[in-house]
Amino acid sequence: MVPDVATGDPTMLLCLHCARRVASPPSRSKYGGLTSHLKFRGAFTRLVKLSFARIDGLIGSNLPMSAYRDEAWWCNSPSSAHARAWLDAGWEVQEVNLQEGYVVFKKVREVPAKKLKRAKGDEVKPFTPVPVHAPKRKPPSKTKVSKLYARIKNLERQRAASRSIRGFKPRPPHEKQLFKPDEKPQ
């Protein structure tokens, strides 16, 4: 907990996460998520159909009510902030269906990707993955080995004791005691 960043008042405590949001608010516009999504999709396709619910998820809040009611809200005029979101990404609205709640965007131009600035002395090195070392296996303990060995022996004994011929049911132990193997009961 830290004092309130905006006022410096130590009686108004904020958690560090909240203080970071107050000290450095996001610099993106409200529709920045839509812009970045359309830029990403531009590498794969020329048409994108997005539902209003999907756009709500991309921008992180709800669209205004006029977007649900009025097709003019979806016009491609660069004077509105929401239209600049798709125009800056190189897309235009092709179709709007208010009854079914979707918009179809059409790609009209390529937007070059931003290049990272590098210092003059930096060289571009190829990507080398981090070496992966297989974990060393510890040998099993003697107790585990002896338990497994005893288990295997018990299974072998069970298989050997219950050898049966197909279609022939072995006699239960009490019958074996009653009759001798070579004599038939009378």
Image (tube, rainbow, N blue to C red):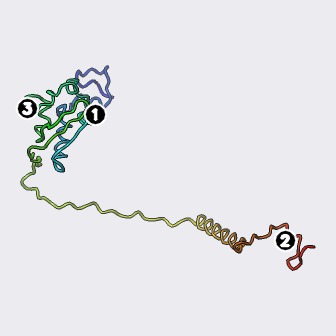
Residue at horizontal 87 percent and vertical 70 percent from the top: 177
Q: Position of residue 47 (x, y in %)?
A: 17, 44
The residue pinned by badge 3 equals: 78
Residue at disc 2, secondary structure: helix
Q: Amino acid at mark 1?
A: Ala
Closest to the observer, 137 or 77: 77
Element marked by disc 3: loop
Helix, strand or loop status at disc 1: helix
18 shown above or below 158: above
Q: Is residue 119 above or below residue 134?
A: above
Q: Are marks 1 and 3 in contact (CB under 8 Å)?
A: no
| Residue 23, picture quadrant | top left
Q: Residue 183 vs residue 82: left or right?
A: right
Residue count near mark 3 (Cα–Cα under 10 Å), binned few <14, some 14–19, many ≥20? few
Mark 2 residue crowding within 10 angstroms, few (<14) / some (14–19) / many (20+): few
Q: Is residue 134 left or right of residue 101?
A: right
Label ID, residue 176? 2
**Residue type at the position of mark 3:** Pro
In this picture, residue 91 sits left or right of residue 150: left
Q: Position of residue 96 (x, y in %)?
A: 18, 33
Marked residue nearer the N-terminal end (1 or 3): 1
| Distance from Cα at disc 1 to Cα at disc 3 | 23 Å
Q: Which mark is residue 53?
A: 1
Amino acid at pointer 2: Lys
Picture layout, residue 131 above or below residue 157: above
Residue at image location 11% in from the left, 47% down from the top: 113
